[in-house]
């Protein structure tokens, strides 16, 4: 093992593959390959996971929102990580992907796709770009307001206890709510920038140029393709594409130092993102706020154990319901409900006092982590 540790990440991964480590788990290999290419050593990730499966004494006094709030206060948490997905934006009017009936993937029949996810698949896009361009016209962000949950993220930041938000969303509502850009990892990209596909070094295109072209329909995007030498797309991460380098750069130091994990509004089925729930150490409490259970350990490696009785769960809590009400409940349990409502009413402009333990003289997530941004 130590010889492997001394090898460069990609070489070590190949050695592990040759030894059969991924014989029955090609998906794990592919995820590690993406991270190895960014310089993250596979052994570092695999080693950190081991202790989590060892049951330990409960770290929460109760496995609910109140227990999590007590933990935050008693342990003076200051490096909270939030992972989020489409469920935090549905109350803004943006459909999620997989809710039967209302989710985007149940409403793409007009595009005649081989499967719904094909609309975000890079190989399919290269062959048949029209479907994505048509959909992009409808999805283009702009007319939606942040939800109370987005302001809750801003609240955690203003209290000084937020390390990072890892979002799968492409609607940019986190920053619209006032979350500073450096606090966000847009893991699946967004519509802030555009690029010509298959260019190395990457050729960027002004996002407004792409927007204008898409609005003109096929004639518009074909003309842009001709002008730029290939198809142009927003910097959204498609299936088959790598996650942004910022994700790979921050994931290791962030999760190593995380002292509480909140997971909001996601089905946790898309990797490598869903695997992040296992990246914080085994004693770090995790709270899922979602309409349905997700990411449980029977479906996701080292996933949540809140459904387990007795010693089977020592740190996971589940709030079953809407993100907005779950965020409000947590804010209330922390005594921060009026701060949250001020942020909601002022659209993020209200001034919020820092958490008691983050006042004067205390380090915080910001000052200790700027070098890794
Ligand atoms: P999904 O649609 O897969 O999951 C959304 C989850 O949020 C579901 O479990 C819903 O029950 C829940 N939900 C919806 N509205 C909610 C609300 N108001 N309050 C609480 N829970 C709510 O969306 P994601 O998990 O974000 O990738 O999907 C992940 C990725 O799959 C997306 O980033 C996208 C997609 O393919 C790309 O575009 C590359």
Image: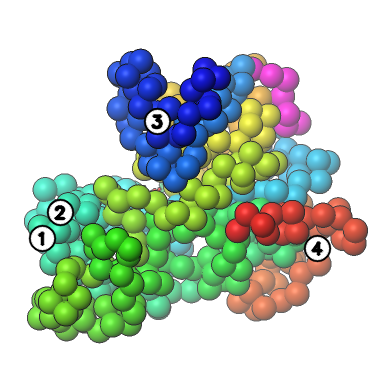
Residue 188 quadrant: bottom left
Q: In the image, which is nearer the foreground, mark 4 or mark 3?
A: 3
Q: Secondary structure at mark 2?
A: helix
Q: Indicate left or right for 362 with 36 as reference.
A: right
Nearer to me, 195 or 70: 195
**SS for callout 4:** loop
Q: What is the span of residues highlighted in magenta in the rendered image? A: 55-61
Left/right placement of residue 264 relative to residue 35 reads: right
Contact, CB < 8 Å: mark 2 with mark 1?
Answer: yes
Asked if the stretch drawn in magenta spans residue 297, the answer is no
Residue that carries the numbered disc 3 in the rendered image: 11
Q: Callout 1: 10 Å neighbours few (<14), some, many (20+)?
A: some
Give the image location of residue 305, x and y in percent: 55, 26
Q: CA distance from mark 4 to mark 1?
A: 50 Å
Give the mark, 2 or 4, whose residue is nearer the N terminus.
2
For the rendered model, the colour scheme is rainbow
Task: Name the dominant secondary structure of the magenta segment.
Answer: loop
Near-viewer residue (92 or 211): 211
Q: Nearer the viewer, residue 76 or 40?
A: 40
Identify the residue at horizontal 73%, vertical 20% (top origin).
Answer: 57
Q: Is mark 4 within 8 Å of ligand 1?
A: no
Q: Secondary structure at mark 3?
A: helix
Pointer 4 or 3: first along the chain: 3
**Residue tagged 1:** 128
Which dot, 2 or 4, sits closer to the camera? 2
Quadrant into which the C terminus falls: bottom right
Report if residue 59 lies within the magenta region.
yes
User: Would you name the residue on which mark 4 appears?
Assistant: 354
CA–CA distance in space, label 4 to label 3:
46 Å
């Amino acid at each position: 093992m130590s010889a492997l540790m001394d090898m460069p990440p990609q070489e070590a991964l190949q050695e592990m593959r040759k030894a059969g480590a991924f014989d029955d788990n090609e998906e794990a290999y592919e995820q590690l390959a993406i991270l190895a290419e960014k310089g993250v050593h596979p052994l570092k990730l695999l080693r950190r996971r081991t202790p989590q499966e060892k049951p330990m004494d409960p770290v929460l006094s109760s496995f609910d929102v109140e227990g999590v709030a007590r933990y935050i206060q008693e342990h003076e948490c200051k490096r909270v990580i939030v992972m989020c997905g489409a469920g935090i934006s549905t109350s803004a009017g943006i459909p999620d992907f997989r809710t039967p009936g209302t989710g985007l993937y149940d409403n793409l029949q007009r595009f005649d796709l081989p499967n719904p996810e094909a609309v975000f698949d890079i190989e399919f896009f290269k062959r048949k770009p029209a479907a994505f361009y048509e959909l992009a016209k409808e999805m283009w962000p702009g007319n939606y307001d942040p939800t109370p949950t987005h302001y809750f993220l801003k609240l955690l930041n203003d209290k000084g206890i937020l390390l990072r938000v890892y979002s799968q969303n492409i609607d940019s509502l986190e920053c619209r709510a006032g979350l500073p850009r450096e606090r966000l990892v847009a893991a699946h990209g967004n519509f802030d920038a555009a690029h010509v596909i298959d260019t190395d070094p990457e050729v960027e295109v002004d996002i407004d140029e792409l927007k204008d072209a898409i609005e003109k329909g096929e004639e518009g995007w074909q003309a842009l393709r001709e002008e730029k030498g290939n198809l142009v797309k927003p910097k959204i991460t498609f299936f088959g594409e790598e996650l942004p380098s910022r994700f790979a750069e921050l994931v290791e130091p962030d999760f190593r130092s995380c002292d509480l994990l909140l997971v909001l509004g996601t089905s946790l089925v898309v990797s490598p993102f869903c695997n992040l729930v296992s990246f914080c150490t085994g004693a770090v409490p995790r709270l899922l706020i979602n309409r349905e259970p997700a990411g449980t350990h029977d479906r996701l490696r080292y996933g949540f154990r809140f459904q387990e009785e007795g010693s089977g769960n020592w740190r996971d809590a589940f709030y079953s319901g809407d993100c907005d009400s779950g965020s409000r409940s947590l804010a209330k349990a922390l005594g921060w409900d009026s701060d949250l409502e001020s942020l909601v009413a002022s659209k993020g402009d209200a001034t919020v006092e820092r958490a008691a333990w983050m006042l004067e003289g205390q380090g915080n997530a910001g000052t200790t982590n700027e070098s890794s941004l």
